[in-house]
Image (cartoon, rainbow, N blue to C red):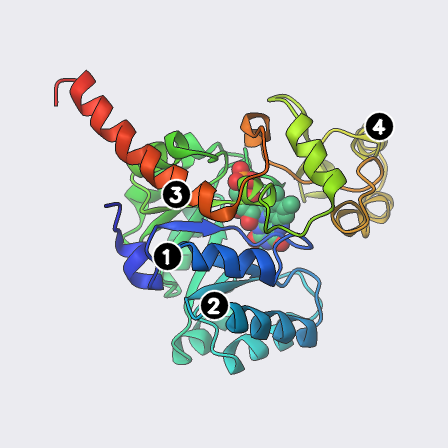
Amino acid sequence: MFKTRVCELCGIEYPIFQGGMAWVSDYRLASAVSEAGGLGIIAAGHLTPDEVREQIRKVKELTSKPFGVNIMLMSPYVEDIVKVVIEERVPVVTTGAGNPGKYVKAFKEANIKVIPVVASVALAKRMEREGVDAVIAEGMESGGHIGDITTMVLIPQVVDAVKIPVIAAGGIGDARGFLAALMLGAEGVQMGTRFALSKECAVHSNWKRMYIKAKDRDTVVTGVTTGHPVRVIKNKLARKFEEMEKQGASKEELEQLGAGALKKAALEGDVEWGSVMAGQIVGLLKEEKSVKEIIDEIIEGAKKLLSENCARFGG
Ligand SMILES: Cc1cc2nc3c(=O)[nH]c(=O)nc-3n(C[C@H](O)[C@H](O)[C@H](O)COP(=O)(O)O)c2cc1C
């Protein structure tokens, strides 16, 4: 059940991706998700090309199943990371923060599936023309860098605009969200926030505690004035950001405030002055679960929901 073109394309059992999350999704989380039947994705983020190679090799030691690498196109090492990914024959590449157009040919020649994250119909269509295999359409409910349209309205519009498979991201945390995304026409989902609160995720325990405490309205979008809006949990850093943005701080001043802040929260556990990126679905999450529990609950829950609702609506 729930076999879609995304399963076929990536060689995975369930159409569930674990979104690449800089400083959060390393080889431990990625290998666990792939082992559980989804697609685990290492975040290349701001790692050096050698560090990315090491992460890839560690995943290969822990699973023989397909996995992915997420490349942030604004990384200063992007050219070399692309080379490493090709040399290591990574099965799937997802990209964030930009247009991966100029690398598509090289990836395709190496038989690597390319799946960019898009936040608009126009970019999805452009990516399709450039020859990518699928797109991840990400709504503004997501954690991390975001666009300005919600998942609910973005997915059906992207689905109608392209022929390649669409994977929905943003605001999905359980079986209900998974099924809703499929009903909107997506052929898979990508979750970030839910997987960040998993046992296999090596993020700092302070970060996980903050996720468990967070309620529906506890995230905020900072960085709108810099042109790089980011969804984070409200804390001292986010308030300072908001205050400085209101006072008309320059892009440079704001970038300086945000520099290194994600690593500070994710690895060092400074969840007041670090950047605790999280999606709005964080309010739904009450406990840390294993990756296998998360995936199994989604698949089993979705089957149950489908049959209950067929009965309820006269199927
Ligand atoms: C802590 C965190 C870090 C993220 N870092 C990245 C990243 O490095 N590259 C990227 O393409 N997306 C990144 N994202 C977005 C996720 O890959 C995913 O698309 C998103 O979290 C989906 O929305 P959700 O959080 O509502 O599940 C990040 C998200 C979070 C929560």
Q: Nearer the viewer, mark 2 or mark 1?
A: 2
The residue that disc 4 covers is 243
Q: Residues within 10 Å of mark 2 (few under 14, many from 20)?
A: some
Gap in angstroms between the C-alphas marked 2 and 4: 46 Å
Tag 1, which secondary structure? Answer: loop
Gap in angstroms between the C-alphas marked 3 and 4: 43 Å
Q: Residue at x 39, y 48 (%)?
A: 167
Q: Residue at x 59, y 59 (%)?
A: 28
* 61 vs 37: above or below: below
What's the residue type where badge 2 is placed? Thr
Q: Position of residue 1 (x, y in %)?
A: 23, 45
Q: Residues within 10 Å of mark 1 (few under 14, many from 20)?
A: many
Q: Position of residue 311 (x, y in %)?
A: 16, 20
Q: Nearer the viewer, mark 3 or mark 1?
A: 3
The residue that disc 3 covers is 296
Q: How many marks?
A: 4
Tag 3, which secondary structure? Answer: helix
Gap in angstroms between the C-alphas marked 2 and 3: 18 Å
What's the residue type where badge 3 is placed? Asp
Among numbered discs 2 and 1, the one appearing first in the sequence: 2
Q: Nearer the viewer, mark 3 or mark 4?
A: 3
The residue that disc 1 covers is 134
What's the residue type where badge 4 is placed? Glu
Q: Residue at x 68, y 29 (%)?
A: 220
Tag 4, which secondary structure? Answer: helix
The residue that disc 2 covers is 63
